Amino acid sequence: MAYRPTVARQDRDLELRERILDCALQRVAEGGFAALTMQALAEDVGIATGSLYRHFRGKGELAAEVFARASQLEVDTLAAVLRGPGTPDQRLAEGLRQFAARAWHSRRLAFALIAEPVDPEVDEQRLLYREAYAKLYADLLREGVAAGAFRLTAISLVAACLVGATAESLVGPLSPPARAARAAGHALPDLGEVSQTLVTFCLRAVGAQLPAEEPQP
Amino acid sequence: MAYRPTVARQDRDLELRERILDCALQRVAEGGFAALTMQALAEDVGIATGSLYRHFRGKGELAAEVFARASQLEVDTLAAVLRGPGTPDQRLAEGLRQFAARAWHSRRLAFALIAEPVDPEVDEQRLLYREAYAKLYADLLREGVAAGAFRLTAISLVAACLVGATAESLVGPLSPPARAARAAGHALPDLGEVSQTLVTFCLRAVGAQLPAEEPQP
């Protein structure tokens, strides 16, 4: 009779896989993808490195799955605001503020997700998730244009511009050099400034009426 | 006496290095970084693969140098417009139009530079060049704010937003799936639409007075 894993064995495998992914996310949140080595992770989980390879073919595959899980949580969290109550411009502003605040409060993880140089498998996932964000923005823009809240025509292009602007505005302030400079006492933008700048930039860009057009931002 | 390369030998080495980089750029422009393998490149240049490794430690290092050369040309070309004649808002609009057109006419290369999943060494370069673009925009924004052409305060954050918006607006239309869809006859934005959308998005975002505020985009 051919080898067939029992249900109990499959459950244990799934459970271990979850535990590996939790530990891996913890590592990335603390030290970026650079800290995610198979050996260190196996030690965290308390298994042999060889067992790790039974669940993930290598670091690239593992990193890609950690990336996808963390990013999906961000997409879902943003979606809840963009599809929630309020006018389209209020929702856009609130979604951007929330996005900036979440990134700010998990800076190491946010930088890892957005821009840390890492395996091509993660770059592949970055492209997919940029599309997921763009789709969220596109839905809101369409609704906002119909409601007269936004003035634009090329919905999907503008949605892509929003994805790029939001990600890039955070890369600088979240980057390791910026964090080092801040720790050394140099003046760098704080969350309030990043958040307000991003909201003003994006609302203006989509042709929304700003709450008070002056003073700026 | 220790081995010391002659001047003639050094010249030949430099010349060969240039030829390797030219051939490598050609490969990336035609098939992206995926097409840049050491073996295929050695064949293009007409040398043994081993000789290639005398000049570049591996594909990552080679790809990073190809990236840096191609990107530096783009930065310099954009700088010439942003620092050229005209009002700050005219220069911003013209710089964006030129950036979009150059990317559009070398789509495979532009997608490779901006977003193709590739070695971490190239991701490192991407971060550096995003800073170079941001610095160019920041200089123009500072000048434009002083001249009353732009209304904003957080110069470097807004510059980062512009870098993100410009890159991301091109990723979609330049991506291999988009090119396949276009080849199959599906309607996708053309250069005129991408360019106009990007200019309107960015001019509004920095608080510039648009030439004619209506109609949109």
Image (cartoon, coloured by chain):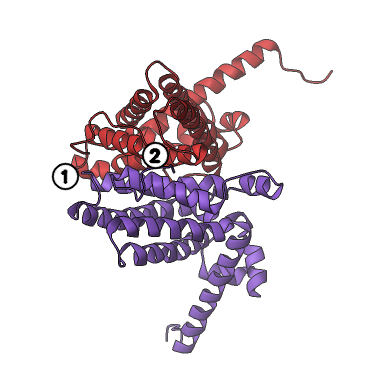
Chain colours: A purple, B red
Name the foreground residue: B3 vs B207: B207
Local secondary structure at mark 1: loop
Identify whether B102 is placed above or below A16: above
Q: Position of residue A73 (x, y in %)?
A: 43, 66
Which one is in front, B137 or B12? Answer: B137
**Disc 2 crowd, CA 10 A, few/some/many (<14, 14-19, 20+):** many
Going by the numbered disc 2, the residue's amino acid type is Ala
On the image, the x and y values in percent for residue B102 come to 34, 27
Please say if the residues under marks 1 and 2 sit with CB atoms less than 8 Å apart.
Answer: no
Q: Residues within 10 Å of mark 1 (few under 14, many from 20)?
A: few
Q: Is circle 1 on the same chain as circle 2?
A: yes
Q: Residue A185 in the image: x percent, y percent?
A: 70, 47
Name the residue rendered at 59%, 72% in the picture.
A51
- In the current view of this chain or complex, which residue is farthest to the top? B8
> Where does label 2 land, which residue?
B167
Residue at x 59%, y 56% (from the top left corner): A32
Count of numbered badges drawn on the protein:
2
Label 2 resides on the chain identified as B
Asked if one can make out residue B87 in the rendered structure from this viewpoint, the answer is yes
Q: Residue at x 41, y 45 (%)?
A: A165
Quarter of the picture containing the N terminus of chain A is: bottom left
Q: Earlier in the sequence, mark 1 or mark 2?
A: 2
> Residue B186's mark?
1
